[in-house]
Image (spheres, rainbow, N blue to C red):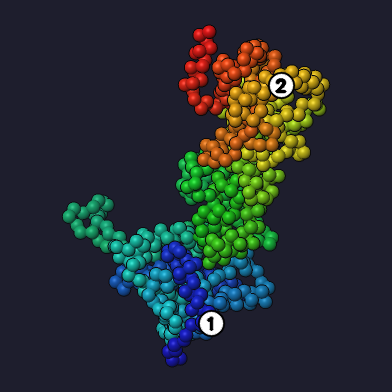
Amino acid sequence: MAKETHEFQAETKKLLDLMVNSIYTNHEIFLRELISNASDAIDKLHFASLTDHDILGGDEDYEIFLVPDKDSHTLTISDNGIGMTRQEVIDDIGTIAKSGTKAFLEKLKEAKENSESVTDKDMIGQFGVGFYSAFMVADKVVIQTRKAGEDGATRWESDGSGSYTIDDCDKEKRGTTITLYLKKEFYGDEAEENFLDEHHIEHVVRKYSDYVRYPIKMNFETEEIPRDKDGKPIKDAKPEKKVELRTLNSMKPLWTRSKNDITADEYNEFYKNQFHEWEDPMYTFHINGEGTVEYTALMYIPTKAPFNLYHADFEPGLQLYSRHVFIMDKCKDLLPDYLRFVKGLVDSPDLSLNISRELLQQSRELKVIGKNLANTILKKLAKVLKDDREAYEKFWAEFGKSLKIGIYGTIYTGGDAKDKLKDLILFYSSKEKKLVTLKEYKERMPEAQKKIYYATGKDTGVIDELPQMEALKSRGFEVLYFTDPVDEFTIEALHDYDGTEFQSVSKGDLGLDDAESAEEKKETEKVQKESTDLLKDIKEALGDKVAEVKISSRLKSSAVCLVADQYGPSLSMEQNLSDMDNPMFKAKRILEINPHHELFAKLNEVHDAGKDSSEFKDYCDMLYTQALLIEGILPDDPVAFANKVAKLMAK
């Protein structure tokens, strides 16, 4: 047939512009696309040969071949797949909206035939879309293609500006050859990305197409010094140029093999090579998902947390593949942020190769996969917690903070993370002197105890000595120790555990309802009433440093403590927020005084001598500062405090 010139459809022109300028931000992806198309073409031929073996013409060695030509500045990608007729080239290359693979799948459904090695989803391609990524790097693209089992070949050529030409050509064998006439910025020593450099091409192939099932081959030019019969280099001999044929891809993804055929060493080596780790992983997950969405996932929990796991520069996410072809690194939409430490990959034939990050966020398939993956990981962690407490505590030491942050994050994001994570979190226990779960705590609560108590501090030793702990210690009540700043935020988000509320030892009423508490409450109210003037004058002396001064029912031996209002932030939370440059939330500070301590009698004595005296005011200020120091808070004026102490000591 004569040479013809065709105009691209209007929709094709628009989509071509969108593809080149918007969807693809990474130039090297064009090679992934063309290799994927070649793989699809071989898939189609392989399927056709199942019922028509003669279509192969005796050539059963499938391959994809790359040829960089530095003289002509061209890169050629060829395959010996199904090839195309002239009309198929017009239909499938000239129109982005239609895919030859889509039409092929229609025939596949009609045939109702299956193959163990080639399935429907293996052959879903995007030929009419991904092909045009070639124009990101090429001024001109030429296709030569011959349909398997047919005579004659077709040549297609375009500069991507608005039209293309179709003509007959000579092509000895079946398949498709695509030649890219590269733009100047993509070849030569000055190019950032030189697509005529064999080693750069090899790097791109390994990065994106290492697991394509057919060999991707390329010749490498090498120079070798001639050697004598003993294999020793010949002195002063000039290097000889040689051509070495190499296969660039490994072809068989580890994750596609049966789990029964993969050793622990193979899993570990893959993990270290793929994710640049030095140690074996803590846990490995190899998952094959079937149903509405088909996928395979290979995930790992590292042995050690990255040093920057909670820093802004840490990039979480799994690698994403479609039919063994690399789509994206660090796809953070697969797993919730509280599993940000998980490394791995997901391969699904239900995901399009040509999908942007924005579209991924809206992908129903991705949401289904992500939900299943998260559930699998959490079930595994729950099983380890139940069956191997020591191993779980090692995991907790590295990644427990992520789970706690996940619970706190539900305040802003909603979701069911609280319910999923509440039985996986651990806290140090005053009773057990080790880490315990909330479930374990609640199961051993005495009948008289109505709340789950916790205390905050920089370490367990400091918390042990808190005066606010005294009332609970005297009753033998268990207290959870919060030594991580996120702990209290986590508990605030949970609010309760299976109906039992949390109660800080340093906030509001402790909620002690036993007989001892009733007697203490009665005594406290009596002393409070008797000390009305004293408490009022202490408050006046301290001014706005405290919201209230009251007689304490929680202190046994200590003289004083600071507590916060039940419904506001605690003192520790105020400090944590301040450290995060968020000083807006202030605790309502309440100074509690132990009426049974000898200092209380002295305070009364000084007060009786004169509420306006400097001595009384010094006592009030020192009492308050003492309470601050117990909480680990430095006074506003340490020098003034030291002088007052010295002054009183000198008396």
Q: Say if residue 545 shows up in the picture.
A: yes
Question: Is residue 520 in view from this perspective?
Answer: no
Residue at 54% across, 65% down: 355
Q: Is 315 situated left or right of 245 in this image?
A: right
Secondary structure beneath label 2: helix
Q: Nearer the viewer, residue 422 or 378?
A: 422
- Give the number of the disc on residue 91: 1
Residue 87, given in percent of the width and then of the height, sits at 52, 85
Q: Position of residue 395 (x, y in %)?
A: 59, 37
**Which residue sits at x=64%, y=17%?**
559
Q: How many marks?
A: 2
Q: Residues within 10 Å of mark 1 (few under 14, many from 20)?
A: some
Residue drawn at point x = 50 percent, y = 8 percent: 650
Q: Position of residue 195 (x, y in %)?
A: 37, 65
Which corner quadrant of the image does residue 171 belong to?
A: bottom left
Give amino acid for label 1.
Asp
Q: CA distance from mark 2 to mark 1?
A: 93 Å
Mark sitting on residue 532: 2
In the figure, 600 relative to 22: above or below? above
